[in-house]
Amino acid sequence: MTTRMLEFMLNGRPRVDAVADNLLLLDYLREAIGLTGTKTGCDGGECGACTVLIDDRPRLSCLTLAASVQGRRVDTVESLGQDGQLSAVQRGFHEKLGSQCGYCTPGFIMASAGLLRRNPRPSEDEIRAALGSNICRCTGYVKIIEAVQYAAELHASGVTP
Ligand code: FES
Ligand code: FES
């Protein structure tokens, strides 16, 4: 198996690791370096639980090779919040009850954070479209949409998404 040196930005910090060419980004994050906030769901591109941001765009880490993020910025759910304060999206999901069992929540939160970074005032349709690749078995989605709408309001008042 071939390995290579991977250099990239992870959660705002430079990182260098030797990775196998066939190592998935999801497995690298969870198993190689212990960032278990990113969840394994279907493991096949269907559920969105593994969503991370790559250069601010939501991406499925179960379908992404770790080696492919060379030179790029990767943000996981562990990057959110500063100085013990929740981010706007984290507050939205917490305060508007957008999470029940919570397994899907990191993926929804990262997809939502990516949306607010590129579109700070999304319409409901834009929120639904941005979360179209994420599946939740518990909430029925209404609370999730409300959570993102509230997060957008918080973001407009200066809270980072
Ligand atoms: S675990 Fe990646 S889409 Fe389901
Ligand atoms: S809160 Fe349980 S799967 Fe979404």
Image (cartoon, rainbow, N blue to C red):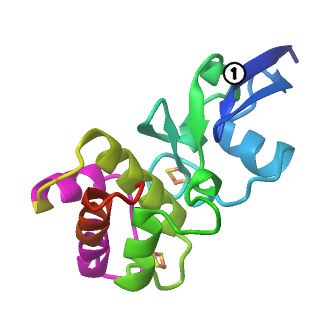
Estimate the x, y position of residue 52 in percent, counting from the top left: 53, 45
Q: Which residues are magenta?
A: 125-148
In this picture, residue 49 sits left or right of residue 143: right
Of the pair 31 and 148, the residue shown nearer to us: 148
Q: Residue at x 38, y 45 (%)?
A: 114
Secondary structure beneath dot 1 equals: helix
Instruction: Place residue 140 in its image quadrant.
Output: bottom left
Quadrant of the drawing holding the N terminus: top right
Q: Nearer the viewer, residue 96 or 105?
A: 96
Q: Is residue 94 above or below residue 136?
A: below
**Left or right of residue 117, residue 41 in this image:** right
Residue at left offset 56%, top offset 72%: 103
Can residue 91 be seen from the camera position used here?
Answer: yes
> What's the residue at 48%, 29% (across, down)?
55
Quarter of the image with the C terminus is: bottom left
Q: Position of residue 24 (x, y in %)?
A: 69, 35
At 28% across and 62% down in the image, what residue appears? Answer: 157
